[in-house]
Each structure stands twice: as C-alpha cells, then as structure tokens.
Amino acid sequence: KVVAVIMVGGPTKGTRFRPLSLNIPKPLFPLAGQPMVHHPISACKRIPNLTQIFLIGFYEEREFALYVSSISNELKVPVRYLREDKPHGSAGGLYNFRDRIMEDNPSHIVLLNCDVCCSFPLPEMLEAHKKYGGMGTILVIKVSAESASQFGELVADPVTNELLHYTEKPETFVSDRINCGVYIFTPDIFNAVEGVSTQWKDRADLRRLSSFESLHSATRNAPTHFVRLDQDILSPLAGKKQLYTYETLDFWEQIKTPGMSLKCSGLYLAQFRFTNPHLLVSGDGTKSASITGDVYVHPSAKVHPSAKIGPNVSISANARIGPGARLISCIILDNVEIKEHAVVIHSIVGWKSSIGRWSRVQATGDYNSKLGITILGEAVTVEDEVVVINSIVLPHKTLNVSVQEEIIL
Ligand code: GDD
C-alpha cells in the first residue's frame, strides 16, 4: 500500500504571493482552472495501491474542508487535511502525523511540496525507488547554473543514481541538478527524523549540564519540534546509500510568486492536451468565441461570441467576457466582468473585479520580475478607457486614471 502526503504550508509562508493570498490559501489558487494542489493530487491517482492522500499544513481547517470533501468524492480516494498547530518544518510536520500516515500500514510514502508544477512522474519514480532499495528517492531536474542556487543543489552517482552530496540553497555553485520537492520514502523516514531530534536533544542536554545554561536557552537550542527535510535530513544522509535520485526531463517549476502561477497555469493547460483534453475549449465551434491555443473556461462563465481568447487563458466561475474583448495569457478569477473591447494581456484579474470598456490591463510578461505581470486584487474596478501596465493593484481600489509600473496600495 502507498499513501501520499502533500505539504501545503501555512499563511505566513505565502507573503510573496500577495495580494492573491489575501483571499485564498495559496495551495487553493487556481492554475488552469483547478486549485494548485489539485494537480499533484490528481497525479497521485496514477499510483497503484494508493489508499489515502493527506494534506499537512497550518492553515485553518475550514479553509480546506470544502475542497477536501469534494475531491475525495471525485477521486474515490480519501483526501484528508491534517492541521499543525504551528509550523514544524517540512520533516517535523510529517513526523507529527506519523500515526495517521501509518494507520493503513503503507510500504511507501509519496511526499510532495504543494508549490511545484511538474508532470509528477510518480509511478515511474516508485518503480525506480524499489529498484534502488534505499530509504528515499528524490525527483531531480537539471536547471541553468544561474538559477540553481534558489533550490537544493545535489550531486548524484551517474551510474547508481545514489545521492552523494546535498546542499540547500548554497551561496557558491555546487551543481545544476536540483531537488524538485517530490519524494518517495519508506516508513524508515520517521526513524531518520526521530534520529536527528534525539541527537539535538542530547546535545542540548549536554550543553546545559556542562555550562549551567538556563532552562530557557536550553529549549531554544533544542528545536526538536522543527525539522527541515532538506537541511536536517537529506544533507546528512547523502553518501550513505540511503537516498537515490530520479531525474525528470519533463517540465518543472516552483510556484512562489503570482508571476510563476501564470506561467504554471500555461504549463498545466498544455499538459491537459494530453491528459484532460475535455477541459480545454476547442476553437472550432462557429457560434463560440474565437479561441487560440490552450484555454480553460468554467462552464458557468459567459464569453461573448465576438471575444478573442488565448493562448494560456483560464476563466473561472461566473466570469463575463464582453463583446470584442481580447484576452491573452491571463487568469480571470470568479465573478469578474470584462466589458466590451477591453484587452487583458499577461495579467491576473482578481475575484469580482471589473474592467471597463476599451480599457487595457497588461504587462510585459516577464514572469520572474515583480511587476512583470499585472495583478488586480479582489474587487478592483478599472473604469472605461483606462490603461494599467506592469502594476499591482490591491483589493477594492478603483482606477480612473492610467498607471504604469506602480503598486497601488
Ligand atoms: N505543513 C507544513 N509545515 N508545511 C511546510 C512547513 C511546515 O512547517 N514548512 C514548509 N512547508 C511546505 C511548504 O508549503 C512547501 O510546500 C514545502 O513544505 C517546502 O517548503 P520550504 O521548506 O519553505 O522550502 P522551499 O520551498 O524554499 O524549498 C524546498 O523545495 C524546493 C523545490 O521546490 C527545498 O526542499 C528545495 O531544496 C527544493 O529545491
């Protein structure tokens, strides 16, 4: 049996995702019309003998309740949200819920970060993991040498794929192979986490005994409750024939910013061509709007037949797209209204916002820079004939003059 665990983090972790995370936990933000966490969850469905999926995070339970119950019904696999009272680190969070995770006595645990976008080759990884015979297998990808330092860099044996060396976000270049945040473990991972916790505790006790430190500073020095998977577990276990790597040649991105969510929405739409073509709008209906490339439109949204949509456009529930509107590379959230002849390019338009006639909301589309896409928060009104370029507009603002490269607070 196999169980999957998806680490969803919590509200304090989502600050780079503002203003979108003001309304919704980042893991539920829609990419290609589906909550971010839906993509790894549906990938788990391909794992043979999967019995349960757990989401572990420190968001309020109620924020996930609706999603978790609807996805459980849809997938016919129980999906449960387990809430930490406070952050325990990526390995600490897992360890905390070891009894729940082990209740079906699984032979393997699939562990996923929620904020990565990839094809999640999980059945293939599981097969490789069984062949290697170690405690864990890490999904790895080759990236450019310049970007590698934002991730865990690692070195693996080219023949055996054993993990030989691991450094988390190093200052000097180690390797262009990086940790994708997708793992397969045997239940021995819990012993490994327990091992480092006890080691720290023993060390702290010793220090306290030898130097008469106060109890307060001793507990501060013994963070047994906070264990990070990368630094605290992977680094020390490298080169000990316990960890192996599986390299993907497919797409992979990390989703820390709204800009990257727009890029990843496009990657998932492109993947739907092969996995879920029924979710994409086809451009051949003569009565429907003119569609180019990969486009998702929620069944409740209304798109005027004279609008031109795509590529990389996702339109959520109850949105209304008026006559002659032009949409390219954008995410239109629930209940948005885009009036006639408005243009939206490289932008995310927040819930209940409205874009006036002949207005333009656009950006250069540089996904990695802060103002590279335009973001309108919830309930922003852009009046008629107003141009908004490379800007971020916080919720509930009304724009009646044009702006460029501004953050409207
Ligand atoms: N439940 C819970 N509790 N989740 C957590 C906690 C915690 O205390 N801390 C982090 N997470 C979740 C995050 O939401 C995310 O999904 C994942 O664990 C990893 O987050 P971080 O520990 O902040 O690391 P990172 O995202 O900067 O980098 C990690 O992932 C990269 C791949 O995306 C590292 O493992 C890198 O080496 C790796 O390249």
Image (cartoon, helix red, strand yellow):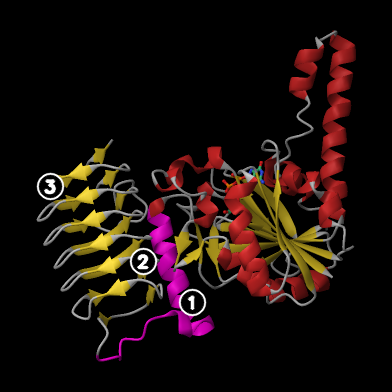
Predominant secondary structure, magenta span: helix
Specify whether residue 310 is in view.
no
Place of residue 184 in the rendered image (x, y in percent of width and height, measured from the top left):
75, 63
Which element carries disc 1, helix, strand or loop? helix
Dot 3 corresponds to which residue?
A: 402
Q: Badge 2: how crowded within 10 Å, few (<14), some, or many (20+)?
A: some
Dot 2 corresponds to which residue?
A: 318
Q: Which span is picked out in magenta?
A: 259-286
State the residue at coordinates (78%, 26%).
222
Q: Badge 3: how crowded within 10 Å, few (<14), some, or many (20+)?
A: some
Dot 1 corresponds to which residue?
A: 271
Residue 43 vs residue 144: left or right?
right
Q: Amino acid at mark 2?
A: Asn
Tell whether position 271 is magenta: yes
Q: Earlier in the sequence, mark 3 or mark 1?
A: 1
Which element carries disc 2, helix, strand or loop? loop
Q: Amino acid at mark 3?
A: Ser
